[in-house]
Image (cartoon, coloured by chain):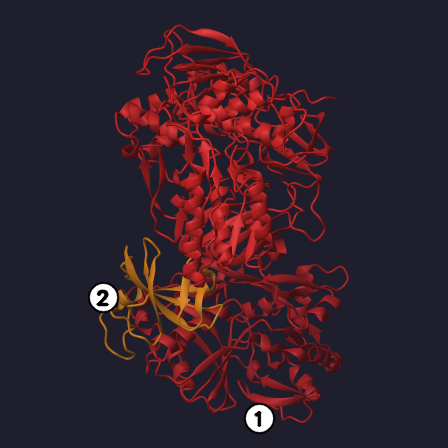
Chain colours: A orange, B red
Amino acid sequence: MLYIKCPHCGMRSQNEFSYGGDATIKRPELGKEISDQDWDNFVYNRKSLRGKHWELWQHISGCRQWIKVERDTATHEIFKTLKANEEISL
Amino acid sequence: MTQSFRLESGGLINRDKKISFKFNGKNYFGYEGDTLASALIANGVHLIGRSFKYHRPRGFFGAGVDEPYAIVQLYRNGETEPNIKATEQELFEGLEAKSVNCWPSVNFDVGAINNFLKIFLPAGFYYKTFMWPKSFWYKIYEPFIRKAAGLGTASIKHDKERYEHKYEYCDLLITGSGPSGLASAYSAAKNGAKVILAEDKSRFGGTLLTSDVNIGNQSGKEWADSIVSELKEMSNVTVKNRSQVFGYYDHNMLVMSERISDHLPETKKYHPKQRLWYIRAKEVLISSGSIERPIVFGNNDTPGVMLSSAAKEYMKVYGVLVGKKPLVFTNNDSGYETAIEFKKNGVDPIILDTRKEPHSEIIEEAKNMNIDIKNSYVVVAAQGYKKVKSADIAKISDDKEELGSVENIKCDCICVSGFWTPTIHLASQSGNKTKFNEEIDAFVPGTSKQNEKTLGAANGIYTLEETLKDSFEKGNQLSKEITNIDNKVSFPNVVEKKSTVHDKFWCVPLPKGKNYKRFLDFQNDVAVSDIEIALKEGYRSIEHVKRYTTLGMATDQGKTSNLNGLQLVSKIENKVVPAVGHTTFRPPYSPVSIGAIVGREVGKHSKPTRKSPMHSWHEKNNAVFVDAGVWLRPRYYKRGDENLFEASKREAKNVRTNVGVCDVTTLGKIDIKGPDAAELLNRVYTNAWLKLPVGKARYGVMLREDGIVMDDGTTTRISEDHYHMTTTTAQAANVLSHLEYYLQLVWPDLNVNVVSTTEQWAGAAIAGPKSREVLKKLFPNSDVTNEGLPFMGYMEGDLFGVKAKIFRISFSGELAYEVNVESDYGYFMWEKIIEVGEEFGIQPYGTEALSTLRIEMGHVAGSELDGRTIPYDNSLEGLISKKKDFIGKRSLSRKAFAAEDRQKIVGVVPLDKKTSIPEGSHLVKDSNAPLPNPKLGYISASCWSVEHDNPFSLAILKDGKNMIGEKLFVMSPLKNKIIPVEIVSSHYVDPKGERVRS
């Protein structure tokens, strides 16, 4: 079971969190024209990386904040966690 | 009754306390402190079971967790449990055990015919034999395999024992209480670190209990006892026996199973049987020791052939002789220690040493005791069927290829030592990259991936002095880094006998003209010849060889067989062992009971049960409950002999004619506050929200980004910046997370706060033509007329002194209201509603009537909003705003979602107006069409319409908008029903919606 550092609460076990997918996906702006292809990429297409991956987790059984976690999908090593409003530096 | 193999004195058992037990129906006794194995051996019982494949007789091979043979069915306090190792099961008064894998009895086993058919049962036998003919599989092969397979029978009764889970955090977790575990725990504890020391067995001390050593002028056991009692006194240390750390998972989380009551005749009151510990450790010190490996020779599975260390443990710990004419077969000095122990107990052993001229302190001592030692000798084969009677022995050439002439000597046991294999399971599970140590001919931990270190014998260090030094130091160093305290422990004086190098000999060649079975894996009956066949057939990867031959796949996970298997593969393949590599070690290290894994989350406790504040009223009024997610909701209120159908019909009818009240507390409620609350709702819901006035509610539908309907519900504007959102019971948690996601990540500029208030409010829906009359009585000071509180209106009211929220919303199609009060007043509110409603014929109604009412008026719910439908499919397209963007809108213009003949909700009525339509049935054009019959749609919900007094269903039907009036067939192959139906509008009651506005 992963041990995740919530930037608000500290080290917590994985079972307090729920997974939220790729953290680098940006939602297209409301009301803006967008091609079918770009919309599909936003809604469906994900890379499923092996290795370092920025992903979202929500601390649902804790502070309920969404956080950003940089994790290695193969080794499960966690390198860094950020608050929702902190920018990822790739 | 005497115990013919019990020594007069000695051992760590309590000879003052006799314990009687039963094995295979026969009565025996042992002493407190015995295991089932030691007590049976003391009584001269060596035949304990039959092997898995050939049904060959099985005795005892080890004295602990590594035991491959002695697996029994245990009976304790009216319960039975399979897969119990006799070498681990502590004796308790009244214990009963039976042999497994034999019929009709262990002494006469019909399956033993396999032993003579073994030529037909080669490696990969299952894959080769049961392939054809296909028709044989269900009737002949599968029942045969099922009967033959398995080690014992699982109980099908409900387990009345309790199992617990516990979460723990510590600085250092130390797995094993041998010399390395005790030393590291002690020095870490002295530095103030929070330490957990786990010992698998009941006694602490590991090899210190059986080895002839001296630490700080104390015997090994005395030293261990003093360290353990000191550790137990320290508040920063948890010392646990009967506790096995069996799994090493991510981020230094380890799982340990503590057997609290298995050694007692019955579980004490308020105690669990077992407890599973989830331990998050900053550092892990693996001190799991090593397991002796066997040497492979002919018939080496005969009862009486066992590990030499086990023979020593039976003598030193249990005061039991495994035989009175022992043969010790060894390639290293450990066998000598066992021989010396025999000699000390008045038994004359013979040592066969594969080495030519070994010299060491231990060997010298054996010689001085006049023990018969034969150098360059091997056991060629054990003789005897149910017990060793003699051994064929021979001289072996220096190159270990040629055997001299074979002689037969009488013996009643053969104690084997093929040197030691470090127990690296936990290290390997942690992701440690193991390496091969040539010197000890075994794998040891290498590069760590997580925070673990391996100590002592588990790390291939086989001298006590070196082990203690290294362990004291590691314990001190690791704890110092955590606690910043450095209390050095003085190193005790250690006396131990020096030993010399072992002979890298592991398998005795077959004598000419003989083809004895030479077993590698004792539990799965995998012999040298099986591996040879697998390799001949082209299997190369050790992982494939393992699966094809089942080497190391039994419940003992190859603790005694893995390395010899690798040696064989590397020899045939002409590779070095590290090039062959080992198979993956996976948790659990040793079997763990399902009960311990499940813990207390069984039956009703597998999830929380939530009850509304009115629950006890429902109970008192004959409610029959149904699970709605984690909630318990009244399904119907039973009157007299009514069944579900009659009661729900009565309740629904009463709503349509008089008035009913339904507990709607379970609806999800979210409080939304902030200056941008309206903007948030406008982005989340598909319809317009910016102009909703204060004191008004609105129905809304929200989508996922992929255009699928996520949830629906009403949201009410309480004040300028304050909204009260309701969600369906099932989606409440998801909707909250959804809102938080957009507020925190996508639109952090919106100034809005959301919080769940589901549990803060108790809710009652009052529905029916007379509901306004009830409202008037409930709120005499409020204007609840159609003008004062119009449809979709909201007001606050005073319910006999309790502040209430009144919403005029309807889920039933009737004039209806929902009243919310703070949860603590829920019961009071409910009683008042029933009281004032009596004169209007009010009746409570449950979820079944609720469903009936919503289905016949065509209101969608979970069975239509099932994660596969878009608003159009549910006839909700009128709620899609054309003017604004919202979550998921872009998806709705995708081609498939805009198709002309897209599915749509419709009503379905059987032509005979009598036959009920099963939910989930399919709609087809022609009931006689050849299969697969093209499916046009499916029935999502069914009820008995109380308005029309005939069955009515909702369906999601292809091209639904053009299908009204069509005649189709409903097919339910499951219920074997074909029903001719007519497609009608989904609004079966009051299609113009006049009642809700009346």
Residues B594 and B724: in front is B594
Q: Quadrant of the C terminus of chain B?
A: bottom right
> Relative to A27, is B699 on the left or the right?
right
Badge 1 density bin: few <14, some 14–19, many ≥20, Cα 10 Å: few
Q: Secondary structure at mark 2?
A: helix
> Relative to B97, is B588 on the left or the right?
left
Q: Amino acid at mark 2?
A: Gln
> Are discs 1 and 2 less than 8 Å apart at CB?
no
Image location (x, y in percent) of residue B720: 47, 92
Q: Are marks 1 and 2 on the same chain?
A: no
Q: Is residue B915 above or below residue B416?
A: below
Instruction: Specify whether residue B724 is in view.
Output: yes
Badge 2 density bin: few <14, some 14–19, many ≥20, Cα 10 Å: few
Q: Amino acid at mark 1?
A: Glu
Residue at image mark 2? A37
Residues B808 and B164: in front is B164
- The disc placed on residue B727 is none
Image location (x, y in percent) of residue B582: 34, 36
Instruction: Specify whether residue B979 is in view.
Output: no
Residue at image mark 1? B787
Chain of the residue on which disc 1 is drawn: B
Instruction: Measure the alpha-carbon separation of dots 1 and 2.
Output: 51 Å
Work out which residue is located at the far right of the displayed protein and give it: B640
